[in-house]
Amino acid sequence: EPEVTQTPSHQVTQMGQEVILRCVPISNHLYFYWYRQILGQKVEFLVSFYNNEISEKSEIFDDQFSVERPDGSNFTLKIRSTKLEDSAMYFCAVTPLTGGRGTDTQYFGPGTRLTVL
Amino acid sequence: AQSVTQLDSQVPVFEEAPVELRCNYSSSVSVYLFWYVQYPNQGLQLLLKYLSGSTLVKGINGFEAEFNKSQTSFHLRKPSVHISDTAEYFCAVSDTGGFKTIFGAGTRLFVKA
């Protein structure tokens, strides 16, 4: 199973500030995803990312959000101006590259808990 | 579009008893089905998945699930639970194009001694 790390594990920020959440896959991956989980609620899809482009995004992923893979390794989620309702657990997920093809299962990182005050 | 319904928000059960966590899905296309487990303050761990083939899927920690296409269900079962199985369990579905996974609301399994 692929290993995915996320930093920081917990981020506290003031409303209106920008935050960057990082995901570091350990081995070769094809697709990248961000999900969020508001406390006590279901896990919600935000965005998928392939070949340095957004493949799909949900209605949650508005202009305040952006993703990039700036150095070919880290995969980042940026929230430009945080709101109280952005407080949630944010999970990165990856789909491994095997034999030159994408596989079918997403593997999740441990998450970053974002608290907006 | 796909959707997932987990019929029970909480399931309390005594240790060593069997358990079934129910999941129904809807989709107009072929899907992959998954069960994930989330222990307190941790991320999501894949328990098992159905892609194709045999409808009975075995996963880690003694769990299994059965895909029933006619009933659009993918219920998770374990014949004998342990205290350590106490966690949140999420049923999930993705279409076979696989860009995103849709999760159910989760079922909290609480195993009592």
Image (tube, coloured by chain):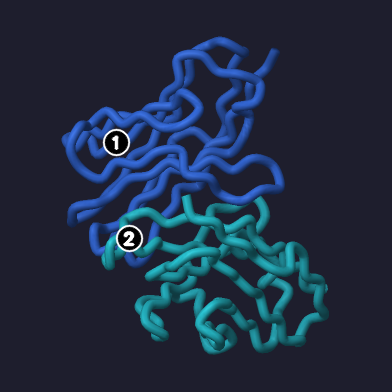
- Where is mark 1, residue-wise? B73
Q: Which label belongs to residue A46?
A: none
Disc 1 packing (10 Å; few <14; some 14–19; many ≥20)? many
Q: Which chain is blue?
A: B
> Which chain contains the residue that carries disc 2?
A
- Where is mark 2, residue-wise? A98
Q: Toward the viewer: B56 or A6?
A: A6
Q: Toward the viewer: A2 or A56?
A: A2
Nearer mark to the viewer, of 2 and 1:
2
Q: Which residue: 76% across, 86% down?
A: A17
Q: Which residue: 53% across, 45% down?
A: B45
Colour chosen for chain A: cyan
Q: Quadrant of residue A92?
A: bottom right
Q: Quadrant of residue A95?
A: bottom left
Question: Circle 2 — which element?
Answer: strand
Q: Toward the viewer: A83 or B95?
A: B95
Amino acid bearing label 1: Ser
